[in-house]
Amino acid sequence: MNRIDRYILKLMLIFFGFFALVLVAVYWVNRAVSLFENLIADGQTALVVLEFTLLTLPLVISVVLPVAAFAATAYGTNRLSGDSELVAMQAAGLSPWRLARPVLAFGILVALMVTMLVHAIVPMARAQLAARQDQISENVTAQLLNPGVFQYPAPGLTLFIREMSPLGELGGLFLEDARDPASVTSYSADSALILRAESGPMLLMMNGVVQALRPGADSPLLSVTRFEEMTYDLGGMIGGSDSGGRDLRDYSTRRLLTPDQELLDATGATPQRARLEAHERLAKPLLSPVAAMLGFATLLVGGFSRFGVWRQVAWAIVALIFVQLLTNWAANRAGDEPSLWPIVYLPAAIGGLICAVLLWISGRRKRPRYSGSEQESA
């Protein structure tokens, strides 16, 4: 790598650091605000909010880095063109393909960062986040154990506990579920226990009565059922997770490529869906060099102009949006039919082809054209 390559690469890395910092801050603040509202409403501390926002940061960075690479190359190429440095390099005999070499190296560096994030850091952070969410759910459930007080854990829900023994057994429990106005159900039990299940905390009620009231237009209907044991999903009552299991994104790429029965049972996914998730991770870093080359090749087509290259910048943004829309379409199509997993690599291939065509067009425009008389005089 000669001095010109190092100069262009250094310039792109400086702009990349700036745009990555700004975009990550914007995305992270938006995510932190929603987490702050939800967690503070559940009575959590600021340290818990900070921990959750830090655990979501790797995913935010993996999404932002390709966009930051595009912004860095587009801005950097615009600056090189505006300062006439790009014109000087081309006058020295450097072709568009030769000038694209440091930009491609820059895109590969960004792709390596995204690879490290999506294959190692993001799954580890998501697994830790899922574990902390389970702990928070248990803590919120524990806050409901307040004897002698009517509590309203969610709109339409009323909970009363007469007493609680040192061993954690609840005595004199009353629970009314009026979330559905068409069917109001009341539970009364002599005693109850809170049990931990895979789907979340469960309330085991013993020796009680269920009263279901269905108000009708003519006459309301009341049904009474006595029971010895009955369970109630506390996780659904306090707004817990409805996934019914772990997420595929919590596991490593190696396990997703060769899913075992334990992984399939924990996630409820099929082997094809697990392998699709792995291929989506493998395809994601490929978009980073494509985004970087789009920001460079599109602006290179316009050449030097005293009025700048903002028209080429607009076309570069359109090209990036097209590749992103193609990525979303491929992900949705493969999600509906996991056997079509090869199409997740299609956006990167088409984006690379667009970059190659733009560089070819730029190279043809830079070739001097001689007339027949000039060739004879030469």
Image: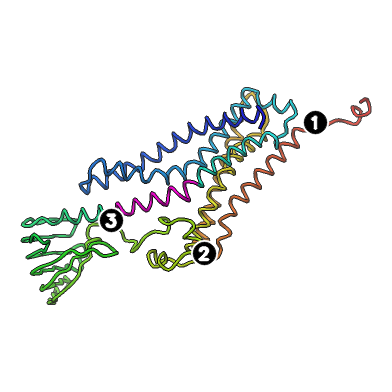
Q: Position of residue 109 (x, y in %)?
A: 56, 40
Give the image location of residue 323, x and y in percent. Answer: 57, 48
Q: CA distance from mark 1 to mark 3?
A: 68 Å
Q: Are marks 1 and 3 in contact (CB under 8 Å)?
A: no
Q: Secondary structure at mark 2?
A: helix
Give the tally of numbered discs.
Answer: 3
Q: Which residues are magenta?
A: 116-134
* Residue 22 in picture, x, y percent from top left: 44, 34
The residue sitting at 19% across, 56% down in the picture is: 141
Which residue in the structure is indicated by mark 2?
A: 338
Q: Which residue is mark 1?
A: 368
Asked whether 303 or 294 is in front, the reply is: 294
Circle 2: residue type? Pro
Label 3 element class: helix
Residue bearing the label numbered 3: 134
Comes first in the chain, label 2 or label 1: 2
Q: Residue furthest right?
A: 376
How far apart marks 3 and 2 lie (CA) works out to: 30 Å
Name the residue: 26% across, 47% down. 39
Amino acid tagged 1: Pro
Quarter holding the C terminus is top right
Q: Nearer the viewer, mark 1 or mark 3?
A: 3
Q: Disc 2 vs disc 1: which is toward the camera? A: 2
Q: Quadrant of residue 202?
A: bottom left
